Amino acid sequence: MTKSRGAKGTKGRRSGPIGDEADRLAVQETFLNGFIETATITGGCTAANISRNSHYDWLKNYPDYREAFHAAEEILADVLEVEARRRAVDGVEEPVGWYQGEPGGTVTKYSDGLLRFLLEGRRASVFKNRHELTGAGGGPLLITQIERVIVDPDAEEESDAALTG
């Protein structure tokens, strides 16, 4: 495996070929684990000591890697959903009542916003914001559309004349 100096921000990171297939697969696995752990492409690249270009090249050229990356995205989504649920339902302990630099106790804080997102995702038919548009007196909404294309701003009067007949 060779290390090369690539574009800005990639100093010391691999950006070219990684070696044999076993090496590439090992580096890809390290990237995917780092991606799941940090929830960012940058975190995965740092863990695997590669440039972002390597990741995007793999997505483009290796269908098995592309499939593995999409699976990692699903795992990450599950991890984030579990954390969102924990914060929304179980809450997070926060220190309160500070005296001389020490907390006097804790209070459990819950996230109503995260709970709302979870409910909207799982029960959209019940919890998703819906808007209904109706016409006058609750009747059907009539939509008319007039489209005018002006190619030459100086010819606007000609365009208006053509529309009005």
Image: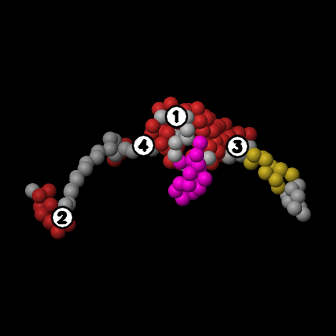
Q: Which of disc 2 and disc 3 is earlier in sequence?
A: 3
Mark toward the viewer: 1 or 3: 1
Mark 3 in CB contact with mark 2 (< 8 angstroms): no
Residue type beneath disc 1: Tyr
Q: CA distance from mark 3 to mark 2?
A: 57 Å
Q: Which of disc 2 and disc 1 is earlier in sequence?
A: 1
| Residue 107 located left or right of residue 38 | right
Q: Residue at x 80, y 49 (%)?
A: 107
Q: Nearer the viewer, residue 30 or 3?
A: 3
Q: Nearer the viewer, residue 16 or 84?
A: 16
Q: Find out whether residue 13 is within the magenta segment.
A: yes
Label 4 belongs to which residue?
132
Label 3 belongs to which residue?
87
> Label 4 crowding class (10 Å Cα cut-off): few <14, some 14-19, many 20+?
few
Residue segment shown in magenta: 1-15
Label 2 belongs to which residue?
152
Percent position of residue 5, x then y: 56, 55
Percent position of residue 27, x then y: 60, 39
Residue type beneath disc 4: Glu
Number of numbered discs overlaid on the protein picture: 4
Residue type beneath disc 2: Asp
| Residue 3 located left or right of residue 131 | right
Q: CA distance from mark 2 to mark 4?
A: 39 Å
The secondary element bearing badge 1 is classed as: helix
The secondary element bearing badge 2 is classed as: loop
Mark 2 in CB contact with mark 4 (< 8 angstroms): no
Res. 121 mark: none
Q: CA distance from mark 1 to mark 3?
A: 33 Å
